[in-house]
Image (cartoon, helix red, strand yellow):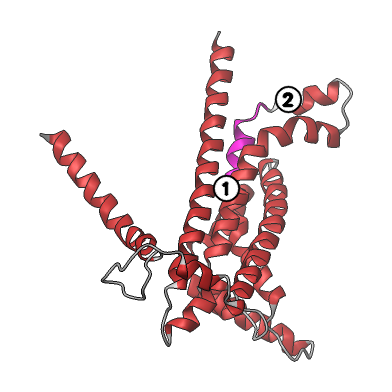
Amino acid sequence: MKKTISNILTGLVFVFLFAPIVVLLFFSFNNSKSLSVFSGFSFRWYRELFKDRNTLEALRNTLVLAASATVISTIMGTAAAWGIDRLRSRWYRGVINTVTDIPMTNPDIITGISMMLMFVFVGRLFGAKNSLNFWTMLISHVTFCLPYVILQVLPKLKQMDRSLPEAAMDLGCTPMRAFLKVELPEMLPGIVTGAIMAFTLSLDDFVISYFTSGTGFQTLPIRIYSMTKKTVTPKMYALATIIFFVTLSLLLISNFIESSDEQKAEKKEKKRSK
């Protein structure tokens, strides 16, 4: 009886979470604009989507911004995680971890407004005409993506045997070569997972982007928000469907990497116990 009730409750939770997405996917293939009557299966809105230059330009801007923020935050986050792991003082390490967690726990609207004020202040200080542009958005995205990369890389460093880099250097490796040959492969699953999370978060962000964007650079979430003031055409359903499947693919890749990494860790522990 308990098992049946738990299955029913789990099913209701999944219906509540995914029913809106299923409706969106279903009506993205509707031949008409109606959201209540399915008049026939069609790729009409997908064709309309690829004819909309403004939306495609916003999509390109979003992908360029997300890719740039991912590369920068992954490099900086990996270096920061490596440095935090090398700290000897527990108190100092705790302070750094607390500071790192602030961008994640801080509400997005507070982060967006504070960064907007900072960019405007610095821009006026240097006499810039347009204080907000692509670069301000890039800095903002790197800021909130960075902690997620650090939190994915740090556990991999803690799981690594501390004696491995020292053994590599004893065998003739330079510190850099020992890092590339020993430490980097151990960190790689966390780096990949952190990069995927950074890309997904940057792709999806609206609040911070809205406050830090300039007039000449528009991302896809801002474009969709501007369309809601009038009407959202069904081609946005098609675009949302494409983004959903891209994000789902990234999440599946991330979960596959994590599961394979856990299996490798279990095999290593079994070998050590033997």
Outermost residue, top side? 274
**Label 2 near label 1: C-beta < 8 Å?**
no
Tell me where residue 110 appears, x and y as whole percent.
50, 75
The percent position of residue 60, horizontal first and vertical second, equals 65, 69
Along the line of sight, the residue nearer the viewer: 100 or 75: 75
Total residue callouts = 2
| Apparent side of residue 257 relative to residue 133 in the rendered image (left or right) | left
Name the residue carrying label 1: 151
Q: Is residue 152 magenta?
A: yes
Residue located beneath label 2 in the image: 164
Left or right: where does residue 24 sit relative to residue 50?
A: left
The amino acid at mark 2 is: Leu
Closer to the chain start, of discs 1 and 2, is 1
- Which structural element holds mark 1? helix
Would you say residue 107 is visible in this rendering? no
Q: Which amino acid does label 1 sit on?
A: Leu
Q: How crowded is mark 1: few (under 14 residues within 10 Å), some or many (20 or more)?
A: some
The range drawn in magenta is 151-161
Between 40 and 211, the one lying in front of the other is 40
Residue 157: image x %, image y %?
A: 64, 36
Question: Image check: 238 left or right of 267?
Answer: left
Residue at 65% from the left image edge and 71% from the top image edge:
61
Residue 226 x, y percent position in the rendering: 49, 83
Does residue 234 lie above or below 157 as drawn? Answer: below
